[in-house]
Image (spheres, helix red, strand yellow):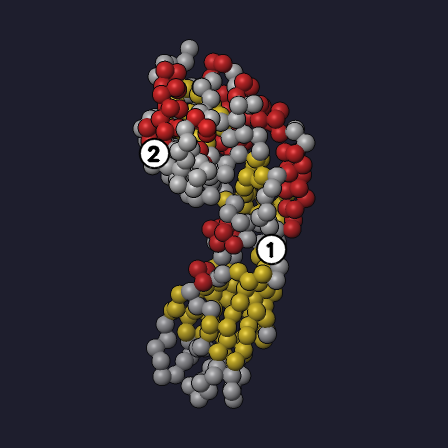
Amino acid sequence: MARLKCLNLKLVFDHSYNTHPITAKYKGKEVKNVDLSITQTDQKEEIHFEGFTHRDAKQKIAGRLLYDDREINMHGITSFMMTNNKYVENKLIASYTDIHFNGVLTIQFDKPWFEYNILRGANLDRGYASWDPIVLTNDEVFCVGDSNTVGFGANRSYPIMLNAFNFGVEGMSHDGCFMNIKYILENSSSVRKIICLLPGETRKLFNFEFLDSKGCIPVTFEDKRQLPKEYHKDVADIKEFILDGRIEKDWIQNVSNIIDVCNKHGVECWLSTYDPDMWPHIPTKYRLPLFPDMDTFPERATDNLHPHEKHYELFVKNIKPYIDKKQI
């Protein structure tokens, strides 16, 4: 598993003043800029500023945070405690980067910040694969899949029509679906039935270690996101794995994994896909009818790419005789 033990960031200060220079101190030493070595996702850093005076109206320090020479937003993780400033109330200021007072700048890192700014939407330590946080409900039926389960751009998707929990995640891979099914089974006391509309064999979940956490993100062969360089080789290997066809066996094995884990928990398992080439590889006992071909109806979702409500209605009509009959 690919691992990034330490993340190197650079805090750059752009100084402005007329007659009175400003002093920045990091760990007791005066600095012009600060090299930050981040080893924990909840790491906290403090920089002290001295020398501000009301006699110099041009005094200011603008702080910028860089990663691989790319500026990244730090508003959500900064705060500034004003200290030793004359003629003003010393108070705590949130989301502070342009500094005009004496005091202490605190940078409090957290997992969501790293997920968004460094890992391009990957998630850390959630136990499931999703761009956004998901809170389980007490539903008995859970639908798992990608954007075709989400119902991207459609008025209604099949989970709504089945009165089920929608655990669809845009861009999800087949093994990401397995991860999400495992999470449901291990964390829901109400689940009785899993319905999974699997994506085709064009995506693979990339699992990695990041500082003190574990993360995951689905990768496609044409993925253009720039993850940290420590992961580039593993991402390239995944793309090759997809392109040379080895992913087909992985997809088939993943189907077996889903069935096995559902059986282990005594939960009904129904599987389908919108990929006609992979659909026959689902064992008959667990196989639902193939998701309707896009050309079945001329209508499309609002993005003109995803299925229309009519596709979902037909899918539900086709699968109802199966899912309403308990598996034996």
> Residue 91: where, in percent of width, then height?
36, 72
Check the image and report above or below for 7 versus 64. above
The kind of residue on which mark 1 rests is: Leu
Q: From this viewpoint, is residue 139 visible? A: no
Residue 292 in which image quadrant: top left
| Left/right of residue 99 with respect to residue 316 in the rendered view | right
Q: Secondary structure at mark 1?
A: strand
Distance from disc 1 to disc 2, alpha carbons, whole Å, reads: 42 Å
Identify the amino acid type marked 2.
Answer: Arg
Q: Residue at x 57, y 40 (%)?
A: 219
Residue 238 appears in the rendering: yes
- Residue drawn at (41%, 74%), measured in percent from left and top? 82
Q: Which image quadrant is residue 79 in?
A: bottom left
Residue position marked by numbered label 1 in the rendering? 7
Left or right of residue 101: residue 162: left
Q: Residue at 55% of width from left, 26% of height from top?
A: 254
Q: Residues within 10 Å of mark 2 (few under 14, many from 20)?
A: some
> Dividing the image into 4 quarters, which one contains the C terminus?
top left
Percent across and percent down for residue 297 are 41, 28
User: Which residue has dot 2 on it?
Assistant: 156
